[in-house]
Amino acid sequence: MTPSPIPIIQMANITKTFPNGVVANDDISLTVWEGTVHAVIGENGAGKSTLMHILYGRYQPDRGRIRLRGEDVRIESPAQAISLGLGMVSQHTTLIPALSVLDNIILGNEYAAFGILNRAGAARRIETLAKQLGVELPLHARTETLSVAAMQKAEIMKALYRGAKMLILDEPTATLAPQEADALFRLLASLKSSGTTILFITHKLREVMQHTDAVTVLRGGRAVGERITRETYPEELLALMLGQRTAGPSVPLSEEAAASAPYAGIYRETEPPETPPSPVHPLPWERGPQSEMLGRPPQSEFAPETSAALPSASAAVPLLEIRELLVLNRRRSPAVQDFHLQVSAGEIVGIAGVDGSGQKQLAEAVVGLSPIERGQVLLDGAVLNGLSVERRLQMGISYIPEDRHREGLILDFTIAENLLLGRQRDRRFGGGWILDLKRLAQLGDRVVQEYRIRAGGGDTVAGTLSGGNQQKVVIARAMEGHPRLVIAMQPTRGLDVGATEYVYDTFRDARTKGVSILLFSLDLDEIFALSDRIAVMYNGRLAGVLPRAQATMEEVGRLMVNG
Amino acid sequence: MRSLRFTLGSLTLAFMLAALIILATGGSPITVFSALFKGAFGNLYAFGYSLIVYRHYEPPIEIFRTLNRATPLLLCGLAVAVGLRAGLFNIGAEGQLLVGALAAAWVGYAFKGIPALLHIPLAMLAGAVAGGVWGYIPGLLKAWRGAHEVIITIMMNYVAIRLTQYLVNHPLKDPNTLNTATPFIQPSAQLWVIEKSSVFSIGFFIAILLAAGYAFLMRRMSLGFCIRAVGQGAEAARSAGIPVARTLIITMCLSGALAGIGGAIEILGLYHRFYDQFSSGVGFDSIAVALLGGLNAPGIVLSAVLFGGLNTGAEQMQIETGTPLQIAGVIQAIVILLFGARYLKRRA
Amino acid sequence: MESEGISAIVVPLILLTLRQTTPLVLAGLGGIFSERVGVVNIALEGMMLIGGFVGIWVGQSAGVLAGALAAILSGALTGSLHLFMTQRLKMDHIISGVAINLLALNGTTYLLRKLYVMAEPIRDASVPTTIPVGYFIALTLSLPFLAHFVLYKTAFGLRLRAVGESAESVRMAGLTPIRLRTAGLLISGMLGGLAGAYLALSQVGRFSDDMVSGRGFIALAAVVCGRWTPLGAALAALIFGFFDALQLQLQGVVNIPSQFLLMVPYVFTILAALVLRPTPPAALGREEETEG
């Protein structure tokens, strides 16, 4: 369908800086034509969601104008957006789990006489609307009993019930199975044919090519391209999304391209080292009388307490083995299923996948934060099921969580205290009851120095550090314990180039010492830059494992999207 | 420094608001407050004079009364603080104090012929255990069933009030008296008295020791580290391998035990028997103590003495000026309102 | 003869039960309207005390009905204070509630002594005529159903319940969360004040020190046991009121220690937390952005 000549939504020069200093939108302009399906694409953190929330009145832009149907408007609240004919389906549902579907749909725009709800009347109206679109909804069920796909339909009905003519969908397919996504696009198509304009966020190129009329690409908070869908091709969009990193039509990184890439030189190290590494960085006090008295090899404050501190010599047993794993999410449906994977000592395995494919639950099951429903996780042949996080840490599994502010750090604690988290009963810090503050302070100062953390010393409060330095603290805690396996979730999210490089160096360094790393990332460049093997997750299952040398971005991308 | 200024500023504001209330109800704030101060700390001028001129060292008796009052406030303030450090709101200190007091009283009078060095610790231990059990129940329900500790500790307060009331009315009642009270404790269970007329005993110093212990726990001990970690970032603590549920339960036990010891000292040091309703309102007052003290040990000691003084001074003030002593409680409430807002901002 | 004997026990027991249940139901409904919009309300006790005192104070000069009205208004004012503390200053809901209770208990006692007991000449904090208990009992029997109707059958009620689950969802649906919270807390305070008015102006006709004596907390217990629903809370309040009445009735008659009957509401609530696992409204006590 040819886009009609009326621009229905025009956003011009939108700029938004959040109080924490993050520039989410930087001079973004966007035009959407009436009766079209328009995609906004970009990597995580490109500013897509912020832009849509500005359009819906949830955030106010610092600068920029919005015009609807050619008229300047100021959208100061969602209420106003609704009255202007906008509707929004958020990425994480805003439906209230405890209310019925019907109540959620009518909330704020109730069908009522003298304030008394006319639920039957509202239900009839919604059912008529739903029938036209071929949607079925259990209106009287509690919303929390619905599947994600059904909740999304309910959100769409909620917007349409308010008379939305322009529908914004924030990553609607991120948590849908392919069949569900197909059904959603059929619904969107029928909405389009009835004259609704649709604006949706995604990072799946296939969806853009198949279901949209036009597309705007965001990168790093800026709009870097606007295309008519049938006049572009996926490679061009990918290049726009990723920027200089994959310039040119050949999307997969060839060996030559890799050699000239900023990460040049890393690929030589992809083979796991054959010899067990020797302990690193012996520090003055580690050679002190204490370790001699204990008759142990010199260890740092953090060395695992188990005798098998070093990678096992027997190649037959992989360091980490995941067998037929089943993990449930909070609503007791499978988040990870039939998952199996082996990781050898000194190997980095990258886990690629669309956001929400079960990465978090997999990581948590290995670390000990999510219960294992079925299957087994083994470290060096020992079953980990049921062991506490602390116990697993002692056995050598450390964790770099995804959200450093909420899960990674305690912002009111000092750097040294953050480093102590999880090791508070370690005998190297006093033997369980009383903490050896001197040693802790030494550790803090040493880490600040070694990891080049910009801070006065180990007694600096973590909350006062910049994001990159905070992440260094999280990584230092994970690496300092002489771990045998590091579970890293998005370790460089939100970091600048320098800090990212530092993290990569740390990981490569660890690998040469025989540490294995399970690297979860949504950034394929990162996965390709570090991994020895790449495992792809799709809908909680293992879609495939490829050695780095044979993997191409294309193939990994295909597995991520199609399983 | 800033926090000290804020503290003094808030206290001043609280007293000014109280002065307004006194004015509005036809009193003179200056007369009232000077009577209050004298009731709390005695005639400090005369004390200083006799100390310097006659080298006559005898502090005013009001100070001992104030310290007597401060002792349970201090221990319950520590109980509230230890909970808040873990993000738990223990408003059940009152109940924990009562069961602790009764347990100590029972050990105090029922065990005969054992030496004081054994008897006193035994009775204190009984108080700590009883209070600890009273804290354990809400802690367990919180960690195990997600029940809100505030609701449960309130309920446990009233259960404690009724239960102790029943026990001193029936099975533990002293048959030789008309009072609803237990028999007097054995002399071997009584704490050593320092000043006779005010019955000021070493109990206050035991409380100070425990405050030092609280500071040591928070700063130097692995358990205190866990408590602070859970309170300031439960999610991060869990991810990093701190046993959150276990820490919550232990914290509530500890909190209850501190309040229970507070009750034990009241009995062993001051009352020497458990009277029905010998204590009331300490549980809520101690929230003011903990907040004003900034959850740290020296601050809690100071604010306990301050509120202890406020309470004893208020009694004297009521006698002298006819101003109802509840004005002290009003000041306490205003302090909580002023300090509570700050407390949460610090946490967020 | 025997049936007369039974009715001689049963009828007064029923009446006494209703009298003891009334403040619990009124305050309990107050608790529901606060907690259902997401604000923890342990200040019910304070709201009742202030309502009772103001009721007597105004009632003495302007008549008991004006007194009751003033009590309701004073409750709304107390609710506004709690609203301001928790929503604008973002204070912990529990701290705010504790402070309000402490202020109410000490403030009313202070004023009672200053203006009545210690005044010269001594005045009596009582009203000559009381509001008939029947009026309040009628309210007790009808208000839970009205509250149920409002919460579940009206648009206003739907919005109130929604804001107690998630302020963000409510905002995305085009509503203003803070207005709904304000409405909920005003209603809560008015009901709390009304409960205080009943105690002071109807049941006893005077105000005395700490006359609420924990009923606000029992009402809160009824809210929890009734799973935050008006009818459930009213039923729980009725059970608690019955045991209270039984305790009063049996005093000195049968040799059951009254303390155990007095303990019923509390033990019941602890067991409910253990067995029923009542889930509070999702946003209860959480710090959220409600303005703007």
Image: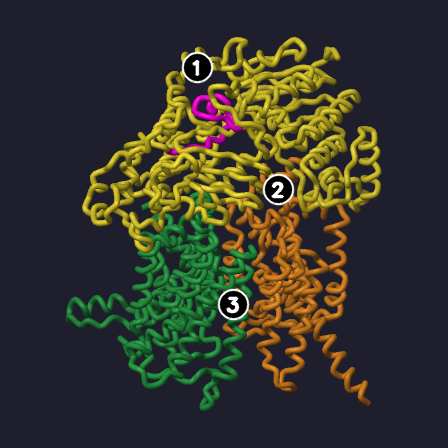
Residue B234, magenta (yes or no):
no
Identify residue for label 2.
C167
Q: Which chain is orange?
A: C
| Residue A111, quarter of picture | top right
Say which residue appears at 58% left-offset and 53% top-offset. C40
Q: Position of residue B108 (x, y in %)?
A: 38, 80
Which element is circle 1 on?
helix
Say which residue appears at 44% left-offset and 57% top-offset. B83
Q: How many marks?
A: 3
Which residue type carries mark 2?
Answer: Ala
Identify residue for label 1.
A258
Q: Which chain is green?
A: B
Are both tags, 1 and 2, on one chain? no
Say which residue appears at 56% left-offset and 50% top-offset. C285
The subunit carrying tag 1 is A
Q: Which label sits on residue A80? A: none
Which color was chain A given? yellow
Residue A523, magenta (yes or no):
yes
- Left or right of A139? Residue A49 is left
Measured Cα–Cα span from mark 1 to mark 3: 69 Å
The subunit carrying tag 3 is B
Q: Is residue A197 above or below residue B143?
A: above
Identify residue for label 3.
B157
Q: What colouring style does the render use?
A: by chain
Nearer to the camera, A436 or C267: A436
- Left or right of A287? Residue B250 is right
Residues rendered magenta in the picture: A515-535
Q: Position of residue B218 (x, y in %)?
A: 35, 54
